[in-house]
Amino acid sequence: QRVEGCMFGNGERAGNACLVTLACNMLSEGVDPKIDLSDLPSTVEVVEYATEVKVGARHPWGGALVFTSFSGTHQDAISKGLTAAEDGDGMWRVPYLPLDPQDLGRSYESIVRINSQSGKGGVAFLMEKEFGYVLPREMQVEFAQLVKAYTGTHEVEASVYDLWELFRQTYLVRHTPLQLLEYRVLHGEVPTGPPLPNVINGEWIGSTNGAELGPIQSVGPSGGVEPVTVVAEVILDGKRVSVRGGGNGPIDAFVQGLNTHLRQHVEVMRYYQ
């Protein structure tokens, strides 16, 4: 028995079926083609070297952009599908992706690429996969608009680095109207007396008045929720302010203390960890 064909359109004559396309099509329908497809990018490199002909970016299964989506609606569907696949029954049911790219030696990195057509789903997908940030829906909408304005103004595709810099400049390094200078977290009673020790990179240094300064946790030794107190120094509307508040965790305690200095109270709507 013999099967004749070509590789990525290059063979004895035009018109021969691409064996890679046939094999991947069979695999996508649940039929084992008995061919090792686990490192398809290397196969593409060998064929390009041997034939001195580039494999087209949109060539079935082997092209560089085969698993790439620019459309906002497609990105949103793929993002939701990948999330569902992680918590599913092991069956691959991701929209617009008949095969798991990893089965062919491809990664998820290029599945979603961001330009002026992209929507919130694609942006949120990259922020979570690349940096671990799970953006609430309202923040997805807001940040996606900023990304769209950036790519439209610069007429470029936004790289992962561009996304991070835009996110950092917009949300992480802003100093107005509120800037957090330093903070300390206490479990139990808040000691009085001399100023509390500083924190370096989120780690405690020493103790004050016998109060043990532990890690930033709100779960006590018994496993129950342990109230904590946050003492912080912030700059609010240009003025240095001392904030002190209690709650069922560091974030809740900080917000409770901050609200005593605000005309309009803030509330934590969602929390992810």
Image (tube, grey):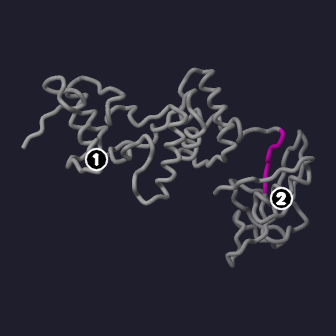
Left or right: 59 in relation to 250: left
Residue reaching furthest front?
A: 29
Residue 42 magenta: no
Residue 23 position within the rendered picture, expressed as x and y whole percent measured from the top left: 24, 42
Q: Residue at x 74, y 56 (%)?
A: 199
Looking at this view, is 120 or 256 the one in front?
120
Looking at this view, is 132 or 238 the one in front?
132
Residue 181 magenta: yes
Q: Mark 1 or mark 2, which has the lower sequence index? A: 1
Q: Is residue 86 above or below residue 105?
A: below
Mark 1 surroundings within 10 Å by alpha-carbon count, few (fewer than 14), some (14 through 19), many (20 or more): some
* Amino acid type at mark 2: Val
Q: Residue at x 30, y 47 (%)?
A: 29
Residue 89 position within the rendered picture, expressed as x and y whole percent measured from the top left: 43, 60
Left or right: 1 in relation to 247: left
Say which quadrant the N terminus sits in. top left
How many callouts does the rendering have? 2
* Stretch in magenta: 177-183
| Quarter residue 270 falls in | bottom right
Mark 1 and mark 2: Cα distance apart in space:
59 Å
SS type, badge 1: helix
Q: Is residue 201 above or below residue 164?
A: below
Question: What residue sits right under mark 2 in the picture?
Answer: 231
SS type, badge 2: strand
Residue 5 position within the rendered picture, expressed as x and y whole percent measured from the top left: 16, 33
Question: What residue sits right under mark 1 in the picture?
Answer: 27
Residue 35 position within the rendered picture, expressed as x and y whole percent measured from the top left: 21, 46
* Amino acid type at mark 1: Leu
| Quarter residue 238 falls in | top right
Given contact means CB atoms under 8 Å apart, are the residues at marks 1 and 2 in contact?
A: no
Q: Residue at x 65, y 38 (%)?
A: 167
